Image: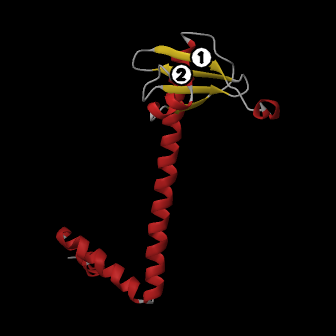
């Protein structure tokens, strides 16, 4: 063997000689690096790594939720607009829950069912109940607000 090959063999780590020891060699190197750090430093680095992963995951997850919500809202508006002209403004969309309680409070919800959608167009002062199950508009009505004159009567 030439002198160059012998020198290269001496410098080769145990990982290179036997691939099965590759993970052991990595662990040994990590331990050697970690030995130079105090325990609080190691904990701090671990904590920062966990926080970083959590923040990145949360950012990714909320981005996906916003995209899903926007596409769902656009689909509902498109379905409703195929039945009637709607105001040219983005609506506030809610899913109707506990419809029996709503029916007691307001006759507007008389024919509504749970899981129907309520579209509220604030500037146009218009409310629409839409059923995705039957693809029908259940009710349309104005948004009424109480004023001092109506409260005193």
Assess disc 1: are there few (<14), some (14-19) or many (≥20) residues with their C-alpha within 10 Å of its C-alpha: some
Neighbour class for label 2 at 10 Å: few (<14), some, many (≥20)? many
9 vs 73, nearest the viewer: 73
Q: Quadrant of residue 8?
A: bottom left
Instruction: Determine which residue is flagged by label 1.
Output: 140
Image location of residue 13, percent across then percent down: 27, 77
**Is any atom of residue 24 visible in this view?**
yes
* Vertical order, 75 against 30 (above or below): above
Q: Earlier in the sequence, mark 1 or mark 2?
A: 2
Residue found 50% across the figure and 20% down from its top: 130
In the rendered image, the vertical position of residue 65 relative to residue 105, given as above or below: below
Q: Which residue is mark 2?
A: 129
**As drawn, which residue projects farthest toward the right?**
149
Q: CA distance from mark 1 to mark 2?
A: 6 Å
Q: Position of residue 12 (x, y in %)?
A: 28, 76
Q: Nearer the viewer, residue 84 or 51?
A: 84
Asked if the residues shown at circle 1 and circle 2 are in contact, with their CB atoms under 8 angstroms apart, the answer is yes
Q: Nearer the viewer, residue 17 or 114?
A: 114
Q: Secondary structure at mark 1?
A: strand
Residue 40, which numbered label?
none
Q: Is residue 2 visible?
A: no
* Residue displayed at 53% across by 21% down: 129
């Amino acid at each position: 063997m030439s002198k160059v090959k012998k020198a290269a063999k001496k410098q080769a780590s145990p990982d290179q000689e036997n691939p099965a020891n590759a993970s052991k060699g990595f662990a040994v190197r990590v331990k050697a690096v970690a030995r130079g750090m105090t325990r609080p430093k190691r904990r701090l680095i671990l904590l920062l790594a966990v926080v970083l992963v959590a923040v990145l995951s949360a950012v990714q997850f909320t981005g996906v939720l916003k995209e899903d919500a926007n596409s769902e809202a656009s689909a509902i508006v498109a379905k409703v607009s195929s039945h009637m002209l709607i105001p040219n403004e983005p609506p506030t969309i809610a899913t109707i829950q506990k419809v029996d309680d709503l029916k007691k409070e307001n006759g507007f919800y008389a024919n509504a069912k749970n899981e129907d959608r309520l579209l509220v167009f604030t500037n146009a002062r218009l409310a629409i109940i839409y059923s995705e199950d039957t693809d029908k508009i259940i009710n349309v009505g104005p948004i009424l607000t109480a004023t001092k004159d109506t409260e005193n009567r």
